[in-house]
Amino acid sequence: MKKKSPKNKDLIGKQKYTVSDSNSEWVLYHNNFSLCSRKVRICLEEYKIDYLPVHVHIIETKDCENLSKDFLKINPKATVPVLLHNNQPIYESHEQIRYLMETFPNILGKSETVDYWNKKGSLIGDDPVGGIKEYAGNCVSLLTQPLFVSMLRKISFLKFINYFIKHPSKFRALNFTLYRVLGYSVFKRNSPHQRVAIRAFESLRSHLTSLDGHLENKVWIDGNKFSIADITWMTLLHRLDEVNLIDLFTKKLSNLRDYYNRLKNRESFSRCIIEFNSETIDSGTQNLREDIQKVSNLKQLYNNFESSPLP
Ligand SMILES: N[C@@H](CCC(=O)N[C@@H](CS)C(=O)NCC(=O)O)C(=O)O
């Protein structure tokens, strides 16, 4: 096996070296809850590609398997998903999807519209705050913070010591440690986390309003043809459902609401999102729903969303 341990922190796209000696042509290192993993799983399903799934726990789902020596050889940045094609890694979910589109150009439609909305739905960069005006994926990632708090509550403090020491992104590790230590009080009035969440909410509302306008008289983003852009937005809208924001966003956006209902009826939605749900995910989302009603810092954050002025 040709092997080289990658060092570069900015690994993006397909690499020339191999990181495993699997017999499967396609291997996906993924996590059941991770939004980017869901996106690539759905893509592989829609393309009908046979692949070997390798589940990797991340701290919010139980453990830090992504920080193990073995996984760091697969991805030194410690993130999922990682797609291997003939054992060569492809990093970053939007690159993995682009690679699939280029490898199988005739399966899902491609057009400027698809590119535009797919890019708009992406999560780009290590710090999501920078890209909220451009990317809805970055906004959704920031609006997931309350769910992270809810899910991390059950994880022991001891695991966070290992997490903080080993994680290659100290910024990310610090944030997650704060969620565990401070709980929902990270969102208290005028805190940086509260301000960022409100900015993300407002930017996302503007992205969703544009999408709602675009969807007028359309079944899918590119008209009648289901595309990669629909996969991207399927995962984003579902995440907004998980954080109890979908009704608030779609209340006045009926095209978007109907579109999300169509997405939920798609087989890949059940097979790649719902069937991968776990007790941790279900109890995290359920507890968040209850906490929004009763935990003051969280309740106040959601009240702020509701009363935030329209652009
Ligand atoms: N931009 C990356 C983001 C990947 C990412 O942040 N993955 C998260 C899960 S959604 C992760 O691996 N988290 C684990 C950790 O950082 O410890 C992509 O699109 O693949």
Image (cartoon, rainbow, N blue to C red):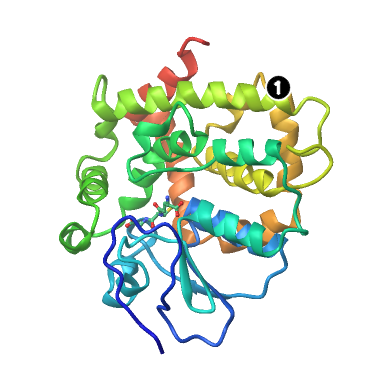
Task: Identify the residue at horizontal 39%, vertical 66% (top origin).
Answer: 57
Residue 282 seen in render: no
Where's residue 153, x and y in %? 30, 50
When asked about the image quadrant of residue 217, the answer is top right
Q: Which residue is mark 1?
A: 213
Q: Where 301 sits versus 94, above or below?
A: above
Task: Identify the residue at horizontal 38%, vertical 30% (top origin).
Answer: 294
Relative to 222, 19 lies left or right: left
Q: Where 251 sits versus 84, above or below?
A: above
Give whichever of 38, 188 is nearer the camera: 38
The three-letter amino acid code for the residue at tag 1 is: Gly
| Ligand 1, image quadrant it occupies | bottom left
Give whichever of 185, 175 is nearer the camera: 175
Task: Identify the residue at horizontal 58%, vertical 60% (top origin).
Answer: 99
Where's residue 49, x and y in %? 68, 70
| Ligand 1 within 8 Å of the CB at mark 1 | no
Q: Residues within 10 Å of mark 1 (few under 14, many from 20)?
A: few
Where's residue 87, x and y in %? 49, 78
Give whichever of 4, 136 is nearer the camera: 4
Q: Give the number of callouts.
A: 1
When asked about the image quadrant of residue 79, the answer is bottom left
Q: Where 214 sits versus 140, above or below?
A: above
Q: Secondary structure at mark 1?
A: helix
Residue 162 seen in render: yes
Where's residue 248, x and y in %? 57, 25
Q: Quadrant of the N terminus?
A: bottom left
Give whichever of 173, 92 is nearer the camera: 92
Relative to 71, 110 lies left or right: right
